[in-house]
Image: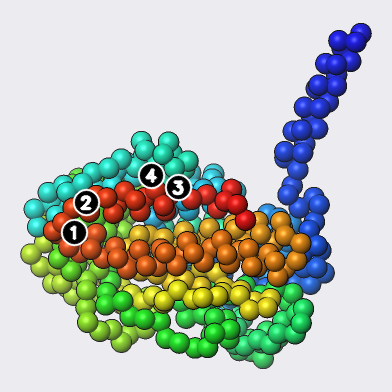
């Protein structure tokens, strides 16, 4: 009798523990959450950063609204490398299944010499990343990642996103913000998060308009159908072709039906704006004259109308991201060179940390202070490391193994879902 009582109590206790473990983290709202439930949280920009933020906040029971200047939601036709730190944050946001369906997992990372294709380095990704860093490494089409995030946000709240809303300016009162859009419409908010990219108007409203800094690098990108390309080009790996003052990154996306490439060259000046300037395929082919025939085959196979070029810009790290109830996230806060494939990764990590901070702290001000404290140091360092990474890709001399290894632990070891805030 006594024994069965104990057993009953043990199993009840286990039930209670299971329930507590799986209780939604918003069951006991913090004062910060109560304040914001009564008013709006506004996110400016529906890129990868804005949508990740919306999803992170929804996960904790908030109901953010996203305002995007474009009329149609979507992303450009390019690939993105999702390193384990980004994948951990996306899994925390509930996107593990979506990644399983839309992303591909490269077997190895391979560095090749530009002219002979000699393998300078081959390191495992598929067999190593999960064990070493707690998550896999993926390649994905940007449009697919964006759609996965968008679907997840709209599944929680079909009216979460407002297109055709170009943010123009804001005014802050003691506990609220008023924001105006180009149409003349305005909204009030308890918290406004600027996720509006490298040319962020929200950042301009906080810290003044200052142009991004040209990094001395420009890029072409293309998406080439894999069918018909030689096996050496379609090997299921991530390839970095290394040259002097030039490099190319190539990898497969969408079930490896396409090979995405980014071809980057050092250049002195750049005056054109935007990501979507069409380029002639001949231009990129002649910029890489003398490179290995696999490279030239890939570049020459770019379908006409599918080659684009743009200049690479970043900004010096800011001393602060937050003023009152307005903060910055993603490229609005810390645009960086793409050499370490961390721009989106940092935006997704920011989103998870901001969501966790808002639900854990007793006031919005404290939550924003903890968010900024946790994120500013890491992202500022990655802006700097991405600048230094030029020598990893565009210099053929010197041993870079130590620099590569220390970067990996620092970048991939981070887990936005568990880091102390
Ligand atoms: C060549 C290249 C390769 C890259 N590869 C990788 C990679 O492999 N891995 C990786 O993690 N990162 C990569 N990145 C970086 C990554 O693309 C960016 O860091 C990321 O897209 C930033 O997301 P975001 O949401 O902060 O900004 P954005 O993607 O710029 O989104 C900003 C959004 O805000 C909207 N907006 C702008 N102004 C306003 C306004 N006034 N009002 C309302 N809406 C507005 C825009 O229309 C847009 O939808 C790469 C970048 C480059 C250039």
Q: Earlier in the sequence, mark 4 or mark 2?
A: 4
Q: Is residue 119 left or right of residue 165?
A: left
Q: Which residue is mark 1?
A: 242
Q: Is residue 387 visible?
A: yes
Decide if ligand 1 comes within 8 Å of the CB at mark 3.
Answer: no
Q: Nearer the viewer, mark 4 or mark 3?
A: 3
Task: Name the quadrant of the N terminus.
Answer: top right
- Disc 1 or 4, which lies upstream in sequence? 4
What SS does tag 4 mark? loop
Mark 1, other Cα within 10 Å: few <14 / some 14–19 / many ≥20: many
- Would you say the residues marked 2 and 1 are in contact, meaning their CB atoms lie under 8 Å apart? yes
Q: Which of these two is toward me, 193 or 420?
A: 420
| Secondary structure category for the residue under label 1 | strand
- Cα separation, mark 4 vs mark 3, equals 18 Å
Q: Position of residue 210 (x, y in %)?
A: 45, 87
Q: Quadrant of the C terminus?
A: bottom right
Residue 291 in picture, x, y percent from top left: 11, 61
Q: Residues within 10 Å of mark 3 (few under 14, many from 20)?
A: some
Q: Residue furthest bottom?
A: 184
Q: Position of residue 56 (x, y in %)?
A: 63, 58
As drawn, the label of residue 348 is: none
- Tell me the residue that label 4 is attached to: 105
The quarter holding residue 336 reads bottom left
Pick whichever of labels 2 and 1 is earlier in the sequence: 2
Question: Mark 1 to mark 3: distance in Å?
Answer: 26 Å
- Spatial CA span between label 1 and label 4: 22 Å
Please rate how many residues cluster around mark 2, counting C-alpha atoms within 10 Å: few if below 14, some from 14 to 19, many from 20: many
Which secondary structure, mark 2?
A: strand
The reply to whether dot 1 and dot 3 touch (C-beta < 8 Å) is no
Look at mark 3 in the image and give the residue it sits on: 413
Q: Residue furthest right?
A: 1
The x and y percentages for residue 178 are 71, 84
């Amino acid at each position: 009798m006594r024994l069965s009582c104990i057993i009953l109590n043990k199993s009840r206790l286990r039930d209670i523990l299971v329930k507590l473990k799986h209780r939604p983290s918003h069951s006991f709202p913090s004062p910060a959450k109560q304040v914001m439930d009564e008013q709006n949280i506004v996110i400016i920009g529906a890129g990868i950063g804005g949508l990740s933020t919306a999803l992170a906040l929804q996960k904790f029971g908030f109901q953010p609204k996203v305002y995007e200047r474009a009329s149609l939601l979507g992303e450009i036709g390019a690939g993105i490398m999702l390193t384990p730190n980004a994948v951990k944050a996306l899994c925390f946001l509930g996107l593990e299944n979506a990644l399983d369906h839309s992303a591909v997992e490269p077997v190895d990372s391979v560095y090749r010499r530009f002219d002979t294709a000699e393998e300078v380095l081959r390191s495992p990704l598929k067999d190593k990343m999960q064990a070493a860093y707690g998550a896999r490494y993926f390649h994905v089409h940007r449009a697919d990642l964006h759609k996965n995030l968008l679907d997840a946000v709209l599944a929680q709240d079909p009216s979460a996103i407002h297109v055709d809303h170009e943010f123009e300016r804001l005014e802050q009162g003691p506990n609220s913000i008023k924001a105006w859009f180009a149409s003349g419409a305005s909204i009030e908010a308890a918290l406004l998060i600027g996720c509006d990219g490298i040319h962020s108007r929200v950042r301009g409203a906080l810290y003044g308009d200052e142009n991004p800094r040209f990094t001395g690098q420009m890029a072409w990108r293309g998406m080439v159908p894999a069918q018909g390309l030689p096996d050496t080009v379609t090997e299921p790996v991530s390839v970095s072709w290394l040259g002097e003052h030039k490099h190319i990154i190539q990898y497969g996306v969408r079930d490896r039906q396409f090979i995405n490439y980014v071809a980057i060259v050092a250049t002195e000046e750049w005056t054109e704006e935007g990501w979507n300037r069409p380029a002639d395929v001949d231009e990129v082919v002649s910029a890489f004259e003398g490179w290995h025939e696999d490279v030239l085959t890939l570049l020459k196979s770019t379908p006409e109308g599918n080659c684009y070029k743009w200049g690479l810009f970043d900004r010096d790290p800011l001393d602060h991201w937050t003023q009152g109830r307005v903060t910055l996230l993603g490229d609005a806060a810390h645009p960086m060179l793409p050499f370490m494939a961390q721009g989106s990764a940092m935006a997704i990590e920011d989103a998870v940390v901001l969501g966790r901070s808002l639900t854990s702290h007793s006031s919005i001000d404290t939550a924003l202070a903890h968010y900024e404290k946790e994120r500013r140091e890491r992202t500022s360092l990655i802006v700097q490391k991405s600048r230094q990474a030029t020598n990893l890709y565009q210099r053929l001399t010197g041993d870079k193994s130590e620099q590569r290894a220390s970067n990996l632990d620092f970048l991939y070891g981070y887990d936005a879902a568990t880091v102390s805030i």
